[in-house]
Image (spheres, grey):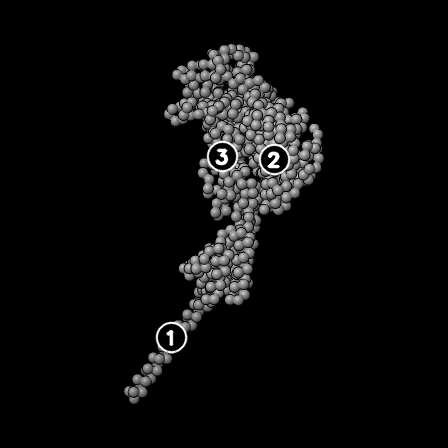
């Protein structure tokens, strides 16, 4: 009986244990199927699939006529995952095939594949030939062995077809394709687009089944941003700054050209520049858009405020005589001087001849608060509001903080810091009758046929009345006709402008001529009676000569001459475009044979560069002007004063074509970017000089 009871007890215990085990299993199954179902399903999904990003194409940056200045270029990269290759023959075939394509020893490839079991990059930004060869190898291996371990990744790389052209304005992108400066940064939200996502199933070895893929979301391309920049004018400005840099060897040169009627930025440049396609190889100082980021003491161009205040507030009769003290004036322990010993001059001529002593004495009639208000009304001491990042406001101290000499110094452009853009905007107010416009550089943002944003001119305020603006503009016209700005004269077309020559303060040494150097500048407007274009050029620390009228004014003159010759200023034209306005020093080569031009250049020791084909010099740049090198364009010699033979532009880069067209004075229209594949009219055809040429470009 005892034995039977023991067996019964063991049976009951066993039965209870089994019941508990079954309950536990049911509980576990309940947890798996009900409670933990969501988490386990997500875990399994992560193991069996992989979500990859489909990069969106970044929007383009376009010139005012649709020229592509920045765009995304498709890039193919390849990587190898050796752990996916299970067959030794497949492993050897892949190693040998890649070694042959990449021109490296097969042992090296095999060693890398054995060492790195995960993903190892093979080629970044593969050429079309390399990409085609790797894809053929991949297809061949997978047909035979199923898995090759070779994977292709398609992405985008930012490409700037014009290279260093307009680089400080356009900006650049980083490795993550995010805008880091310029338009790329300012409008990054519009340009960036939205990345898509795709889900790919993986096997136990984490090998992707590319057939089983599910698109979670499609990429949305970024919007296109169109600038107000005139590409042909920008080319002219950059070319002239580069020439000035080579001639004067300054610290830097900068320029901005505006439409005074709207505030549109037509050109903006700083030299030295950089190529955003190779950003890592350039000194970071070249990345700065100095037109809006660097402030400086402007010198005599700031006399605009003094002249405007005197005329607007009627504090001094400019027909009265001013004692200019033989070019020297002592104020407390400070001395104000002129470069010439002026004795007595009428007030009007004190501005025309840029006489410092005379300007200081005239400005002393202006109440300080009114002078300050006028300077602020012109926009000095505050940002212009341009749609670019990094703009500084300059500096204009309030009258309560002025010293006994501050009014005198500020009236001639010292003790005040400005940017080049501020000065250009202020002179635009003179050009358009007294209105200060907000400058802008982006005209439109669009996605496909849909316009997302359309910019428009915005008047900030009226600075002075029209009569005052006309009076000041007349003074500026006299500056160019007989004052310090004669170097900016364009024969047959009235130009108004103002020179600026300012010593640069160097720390505690103050305005030391040797250590500090000078800032030479000139601001001009054309035509003077109804300006369509305002240009301001600044050259910092030029070597040799340093006067604004000598260094900067000729640069503005050449910009205006080339703009007129290219038909950019509608109301202006040379009297005879076949015989452009003659300048100093350089002879007229037009009409000479190639041999005659060579002999003449040798006699004058003047370097010449021949462009085009033929035996007759049809045009030159500069046109009978002051230059270190003259570009001569050759042709067959057909044509007359009204017509010319269309030059060969096909096969040139867009930049080269623009330069040649500029030399010939031919207005051009551009489609695409890169290399000129077609031109209309064709080379050699006789065309009217006023007709434009359409050039169609393709990226090689």
Residue at (55%, 27%) from the top-left corner?
Answer: 605
In the displayed structure, 232 sits above or below 300; it is below
Which residue position is annotated with label 3?
272
Circle 2 or circle 3, nearest the eye: 2
Which residue position is annotated with label 1?
20
Image-quadrant location for residue 509: top left
Residue at (68%, 40%) from the top-left corner?
Answer: 682
Judge left or right: residue 440 versus residue 92: right
Where's residue 138, x and y in %? 52, 61
Image-quadrant location for residue 465: top right
Label 2 with label 1: CB-CB less than 8 Å: no
Where's residue 187, x and y in %? 53, 42
- For the residue labelled by badge 1, is the local secondary structure a helix, a strand or a loop? helix
Alpha carbon separation for disc pair 2 and 1: 99 Å
Residue at (70%, 37%) from the top-left corner?
Answer: 685
Where's residue 518, x and y in %? 46, 25
Label 3 with label 1: CB-CB less than 8 Å: no
Which residue position is annotated with label 2?
611
Label 2 crowd (10 A; few <14 / some 14-19 / many >=20): some
Label 2 with label 3: CB-CB less than 8 Å: no
Circle 2 or circle 1, nearest the eye: 2
Label 1 crowd (10 A; few <14 / some 14-19 / many >=20): few
- For the residue labelled by badge 3, is the local secondary structure a helix, a strand or a loop? loop
Alpha carbon separation for disc pair 2 and 3: 26 Å
Q: Which residue lies furthest to the bottom in this view?
A: 1
């Amino acid at each position: 009986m005892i034995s039977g009871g023991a067996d019964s007890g063991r049976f009951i215990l066993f039965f209870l244990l089994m019941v508990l085990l079954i309950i536990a299993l049911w509980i576990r199954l309940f947890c798996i199927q009900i409670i933990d179902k969501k988490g386990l399903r997500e875990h399994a999904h992560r193991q069996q699939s992989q979500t990859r990003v489909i990069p969106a194409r970044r929007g383009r940056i376009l010139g005012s006529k649709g020229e592509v200045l920045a765009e995304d270029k498709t890039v193919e990269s390849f990587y190898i995952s050796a752990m996916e290759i299970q067959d030794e023959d497949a492993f050897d075939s892949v190693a040998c095939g890649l070694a042959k394509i990449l021109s490296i020893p097969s042992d090296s490839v095999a060693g890398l594949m054995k060492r790195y079991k995960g993903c190892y990059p093979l080629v970044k930004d593969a050429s079309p030939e390399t990409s085609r060869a790797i894809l053929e190898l991949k297809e061949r291996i997978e047909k035979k062995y199923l898995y090759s371990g070779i994977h292709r990744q398609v992405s985008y790389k930012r490409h700037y077809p014009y290279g260093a052209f307009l680089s400080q304005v356009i900006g650049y992108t980083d490795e993550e394709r995010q805008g880091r400066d310029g338009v790329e940064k300012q409008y990054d939200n519009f340009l960036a687009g939205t990345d898509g996502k795709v889900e790919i199933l993986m096997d136990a070895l984490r090998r992707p089944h590319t057939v089983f893929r599910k698109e979670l979301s499609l990429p949305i391309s970024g919007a296109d941003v169109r600038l107000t920049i005139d590409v042909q004018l920008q080319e002219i400005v950059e070319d002239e700054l580069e020439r000035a840099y080579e001639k004067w060897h300054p610290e830097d040169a900068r320029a901005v050209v505006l439409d005074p009627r709207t505030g549109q930025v037509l050109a903006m440049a700083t030299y030295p520049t950089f190529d955003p396609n190779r950003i890592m190889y350039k000194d970071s100082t070249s990345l700065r858009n100095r037109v809006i980021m660097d402030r400086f003491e402007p010198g005599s161009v700031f006399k605009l405020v003094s002249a405007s205040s005197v005329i607007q507030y009627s504090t001094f009769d400019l027909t009265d005589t001013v004692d200019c003290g033989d070019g020297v004036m002592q104020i407390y322990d400070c001395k104000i001087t002129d470069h010439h010993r002026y004795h007595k001059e009428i007030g009007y001529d004190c501005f025309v001849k840029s006489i410092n002593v005379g300007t200081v004495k005239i400005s002393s009639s202006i109440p300080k608060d009114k002078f300050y208000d006028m300077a602020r009304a012109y926009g000095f001491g505050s940002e212009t509001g341009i749609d670019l990042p990094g703009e500084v406001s300059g500096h204009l101290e309030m009258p309560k903080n002025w010293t006994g000499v501050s009014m005198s110094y500020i009236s001639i452009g010292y003790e005040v810091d400005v940017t080049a853009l501020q000065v250009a905007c202020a002179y635009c107010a003179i050009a358009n009758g007294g209105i200060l416009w907000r400058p802008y550089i982006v005209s439109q943002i669009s996605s496909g046929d849909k316009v997302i944003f359309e910019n428009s001119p915005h008047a900030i305020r009226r600075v002075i009345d029209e009569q005052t603006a006309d009076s000041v503009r007349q003074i500026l016209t006299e500056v160019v006709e007989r004052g310090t700005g004669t170097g900016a004269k364009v024969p047959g077309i009235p130009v108004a402008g103002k020179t600026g020559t300012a010593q640069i303060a160097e720390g505690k040494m103050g305005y030391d001529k040797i250590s500090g150097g000078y800032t030479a500048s000139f601001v001009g407007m054309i035509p003077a009676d109804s300006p369509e274009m305002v240009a301001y050029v600044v050259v910092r620390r030029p070597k040799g000569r340093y006067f604004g009228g000598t260094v900067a004014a000729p640069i503005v003159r050449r910009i205006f001459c080339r703009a007129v010759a290219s038909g950019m200023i509608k109301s202006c034209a040379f009297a005879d475009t076949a015989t452009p306005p003659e300048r100093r020093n350089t002879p007229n080569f037009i009409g000479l044979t190639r041999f005659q031009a060579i002999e003449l250049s040798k006699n004058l020791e003047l370097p010449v560069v021949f462009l085009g084909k033929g035996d007759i010099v049809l045009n030159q740049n500069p046109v009978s002007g002051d230059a270190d090198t003259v570009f001569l364009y050759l042709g067959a010699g057909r044509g007359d004063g009204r017509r010319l033979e269309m030059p060969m532009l096909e096969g040139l880069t867009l930049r080269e074509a623009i330069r040649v067209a500029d030399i010939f004075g031919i207005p051009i229209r551009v489609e695409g970017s890169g290399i000129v594949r077609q031109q209309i009219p064709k080379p050699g055809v006789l065309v009217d000089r006023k007709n434009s040429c359409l050039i169609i470009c393709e990226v090689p």
